[in-house]
Image: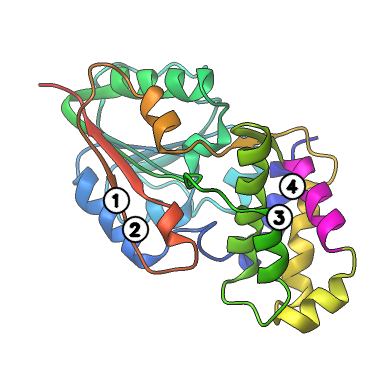
Amino acid sequence: MSHWQRYHTRWSLIQPPLRPDPDVINAVKTYAGQGQTLLLGVTPELADPFDHLDAVDRNPAMIKNVWPGDTMRKRAIEGNWLEIELPPCAYAAVIGDGSLNNLAWRSEIARMLERAMQWLRPGGRFACRLFERPAAGFSRRQLQRGASETAGINFHAFKWQVAMHLAQERGANVPVASILQSFNELFPDRDELSRTTGWPRQVIDTIDVYQGSHISYSFPDRREFIEALPQDAIDVTFTPCGSYDLAACCPILTFQKPD
């Protein structure tokens, strides 16, 4: 089972970095402009700012429960980004929020970026926020220390630190079930964790959505993301954006298709 089938039930409890904040939304909007836009996923915060938009998501539950709804100029399409047939050169921009992290490094990410280049019009832009593993990584000791006092970051940012720790230890691709397993091994007493850190127990328990899921995320570092870029991409940037928790690990990747 994929945890995405039930992820929408926890959507209201999710905070940045797992959802984009206003700075990220404004930055993606600025990079993309207002031509026909393709959104990878159904992130509602990125659907609202665009007048002409197609959104592709393979999970019907996310489309049904998270997508704000089709209009004359906006629609959600159920489909796999790596398999769906879309017309070439049809979009002025391809955008996403953490979308590439839903794919395996390196093969799937590289294939997805090549497909984005095919869908972009000449001169079109790609803009997607990344969850990028820092070069130094997060150690087990850092995680334990961070959870031993009143937390300086929200739980979702901490959960991503756990995931990036696993990626540093085992490779960029991380089964989400292993995030849950490692978290439970590190912090077996959730009530005590809640009392110590101030994280609400209800929010901590959102991590249980990963139970039994066969899905993996990837957390490449900067070098690994660069390795997956299309060779003909120009004007490549990794731009810091926002001041939310873990924002330093969440740059916006942009590049342009040559004219």
* Above or below for 114 versus 65: above
Mark 4 vs 2: CB contact within 8 A: no
Q: What residue sits right under mark 1 in the picture?
A: 28
Three-letter code for the amino acid on which mark 2 is drawn: Ile
Proximity of marks 1 and 2: CB atoms separated by less than 8 Å: yes
The residue tagged with tag 2: helix, strand or loop? Answer: helix
Contact, mark 1 vs mark 4 (Cβ under 8 Å): no
- In the rendered structure, which disc, 3 or 1, sits on the residue that comes first in sequence? 1
Q: What amino acid does circle 1 point to? A: Val
Q: Magenta stretch?
A: 176-187
The residue that appears at 63% across and 77% down in the rendered structure is: 151
Of labels 1 and 4, earlier in sequence is: 1
Residue at 36 percent of width and 29 percent of height: 226
Quarter of the picture holding the C terminus: top left
Distance from the alpha carbon under mark 4 to that under mark 2:
27 Å
From the image, tell me which residue sits under label 2.
25
Q: Earlier in the sequence, mark 3 or mark 4?
A: 3
Circle 4 sits on which residue? 179
Residue 255 included in the magenta stretch of the image? no
According to the image, what is the colour scheme of the structure?
Answer: rainbow
Residue displayed at 59% across by 33% down: 172
The residue singled out by tag 3 in the image is 140
